[in-house]
Image (cartoon, grey):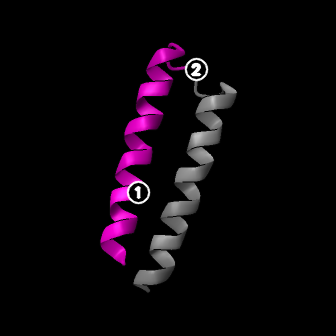
Amino acid sequence: MNKKLEEQIGTARQLMVRVAEKYNFDLVHPKVVHISQRLDRLIVSYMRKCS
């Protein structure tokens, strides 16, 4: 199960970078923030499963 979360984290991270690039690295752009929050939730979930 951790492998699946790791893949989701990697995918979300790559997406966040691409979207941030698209918006000239405006890290407060709503789309970037939305993906970042999703990534945060995935990381928290991963950390809970690993502890």
Q: Which residues are magenta?
A: 1-25
Answer above or below: position of 49 versus 36. below
Q: Is residue 22 magenta?
A: yes
Name the amino acid, label 2.
Asp
Q: Are marks 2 and 1 in contact (CB under 8 Å)?
A: no
Q: Position of residue 26 (x, y in %)?
A: 58, 20
Q: Which residue is mark 2?
A: 26
Q: Position of residue 8 (x, y in %)?
A: 40, 57
Q: Position of residue 9 (x, y in %)?
A: 41, 55
Q: Which residue is mark 1?
A: 8
Name the amino acid, label 1.
Gln
Answer above or below: position of 5 versus 24. below
Q: Which comes before the other along the chain, label 2 or label 1? A: 1
Answer above or below: position of 21 versus 31. above
Q: Position of residue 10 (x, y in %)?
A: 35, 51
For numbered disc 2, what is the local secondary structure? loop
C-alpha gap between disc 2 and disc 1 = 23 Å
Residue at the image position 49 percent from the left and 25 percent from the top: 20
User: Which residue is most to the top?
Assistant: 24
Residue at the image position 59 percent from the left and 32 percent from the top: 32
